[in-house]
Image: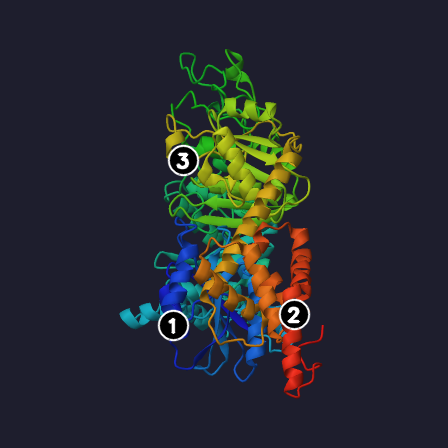
Amino acid sequence: MIAKAVKGKGFRGALEYDLNKEKGQLLDTNMSGETLRELAAEFGEIRKLRPNLGKAVLHVSLSAAPGEQLTDKQWREIGQRYLIGMDLHHNQYVITRHTDTEHEHIHILANRIRFDGSVTSDSCDYKRQEALMREIEREYGLQRVAPSIEAERRAPTKGEIEAGIRTGQPSAKQQLQQLADAAAKGCRSFSEYQERLEAGGVELVPVVQLGGAKLSGLSYRLDGVTMKGSDLGKGYSPAGLAKRGVKYEQDRDFAAVRASVERDTARAFGGSDRDSAADQTPERGGLGRDAGAVGAGAGRPDGRDTADAGRNRSQEPGAGREVQSPDRLSDPAMEGCSKGSAEGSGQPEPGRGADGVEPLRPGRDDGAGYGSARERVLALAGTADRAEPTGRESRSRVPEAGRDRSLEAIQRQITALGVARFEVGIREAKTGQMMNREWERAELEQSVPWLKRMNAKGNDVYIRPAGEHGLVLVDDLTPAALDRMKREGFPPAATIETSPGNHQAWVKLSDKPISSDARIIAAQGLAKQYGGDMNSADSRHYGRLAGFTNQKPQHTRDGRQPYVLARDCSGEASAAAPAFLESIGQLIDREASRKEREGRMEAIRVVKQGHGLHDPVREYQRQAQRLMAKYGDKADLSRMDWMIATDMAKSGNWGLQDIEKGIREASPALESRKAGHIEDYAKRTAEKAWAAPEVQQYRQEQALQAQRAGKSQDGPGYSR
């Protein structure tokens, strides 16, 4: 089974596609609308809860393999399995089945915004979706359909197909696939494969490890476009090529690999520094276990970053190998400013002590600001000292070796948060989009070098706990607000200074997980009470990760960005949290009761007469509709329950349990009852109505009339 999910902005177009297909049918929905217009309006009402969310529409197709057949019931079950597995069961949805292709499939149109206004997370949605498809295949005995990411050759996307039709030209991916297939045919060595591709205008960008013993990655470049082998398909990666007979052997092929690395390094440095390029050869450490190739995986834990490494480095003397050598700590660029500079006085910035990571000062000799590529790489490598010395000491002191202060700040923060897994977000500087990763603590610590590279390129780095937890984030706090929080019993488990004088507070309300609704209300309450940012007061907002620079332009000063600092990180739960959570629980109960009452009132308003004649719930709703039309919405609802119960008891068509069910499942009066009293209220009301004197008298009269007419008093409907 194959799942394809697309996020979009408008529900109307997707509804028209799903519902107006000639061979389509509606399988399931949790919405009351029946027409396309009604459903679109109903989606729109929930959409208003999050007006700033760009893509609220999730359109999913689930397809069986050609020849496999499933019943409507099975497709409905599969649709529900998908919704639950992807955490969409608290969202609006419409499931339709289409039979217009050779393979059976359904469409699920879901609102990413839940009924409570929160947004379903799309973190790792592709991996979760693929795992869910494999489970469904096993449970229903379906043929396993490999996802596109596992294909030996990636199929063209819809956009590539449309562009090809429009321009008459294949995409860069298709051209590379064709050229690589032709080069691999009958080829038996990597050197020969590379020669054939270069004859066709394709450059290879290899990534090797273990001093050149292992070819771990491969990218292809054609007409300035670079694509990883995995983007073309599994058959174009080193492992896939080996299966096709194109094998890499160090003794035979390493010279070709080295030539590609040197060429790529020269390109990264503008081709102006041949010595720098030569220094990146395997013999001089450029292709060691950790180094990879310049521009090919440097600094990333998975080694997949390709040819752009080094392109953002300034072309200053010593660029190249030196910029990759943070162990050379005596460089003047890491020392304080000149004597007459206020920035070089050695004193921390106001409100920015030595806790966490300090901003870099400009170098003495070249006068460059913090934006200097060489300074940034050295600082991000962890060589900046905790506090800058003053006077003569600043000219000779060597920073402490082997210390990664970014990692220290990260460890302080994640230890204080105290959860097992984290979601790390990297907001790309060019597009503003968030790239998400979900890691355990060890994985996060191992990924620090890659995060440093991403931050050095101008991207901001964020973090939030993954899964269920007892933490809330309060953003945009002043030092005075933090002091007041401590005095009033809400000391943060972790205080993060995101820019001078501006703080984020992670407040631990419980060591155990609390509901998403409770976290939202708590975050909003604390933000309002202490002057925080209300726009950030939700259960899914990211906070800053300490140890990295804040790249927002408004915080730039003299061309430098401030570091995010880990301040107080006690990790303790707030003393005032238990009472606070109890009040939140009461508020949630009241809100749930209010929504339940509104839902029941709406069901009464829209119930159709003449349907469900044998359903006690529908009978209650029809009678309530009649009474509310007579007495208005302000009618005494408990009195209405009594009138309906006695009427149903008199009719002889409903038993005691039927009356109880009608009240329990349809009465709006239950909104005012405590949760534990609902069952008791429905049962007592039904029993009192059944035993009421006027009901007994009425039933006796009916029984007497029936006896006179020759009917049995023990007929159906009269027994308790």
Of labels 2 and 1, earlier in sequence is 1
- Is 372 situated above or below 3? above
- The quadrant the N terminus occupies is bottom right
Mark 1 and mark 3: Cα distance apart in space: 41 Å
The total of numbered circles placed on residues is 3
Note whether residue 636 is visible.
Answer: yes
**Number of the label disc, if any, that sits on residue 552:** 3
Q: Nearer the viewer, mark 3 or mark 2?
A: 2
Q: Quadrant of residue 133?
A: bottom right
- Residue 576, percent from left and from top: 64, 31
* Nearer the observer, 262 or 66: 66
Tell me which numbered mark, 1 or 3, is placed earlier along the sequence.
1
Vertical position of residue 547 compared to residue 114: above or below:
above
Q: Residue at x 41, y 56 (%)?
A: 45
**Nearer to us in this view, 569 or 91:** 91
Which residue appears farthest toward the left when viewing the image? 167
Q: Is residue 472 found left or right of 35 in the rendered image?
A: right
Q: In the image, residue 141 lies at what x, y percent?
A: 64, 78
Q: Is residue 206 above or below residue 495?
A: below
- Three-letter amino acid code at disc 3? Lys
Residue located beneath label 1 in the image:
17
Secondary element type, mark 3: loop
**Label 1–label 3 contact, CB within 8 A:** no
CA–CA distance in space, label 2 to label 1 = 60 Å
Q: Secondary structure at mark 1?
A: helix
Whole-percent x and y of residue 383? 55, 29
Which residue was labeled with disc 2? Answer: 697
Tag 2: amino acid? Gln
For image coordinates 68% across by 82% down, the residue present is: 715
Q: Is residue 564 visible?
A: no
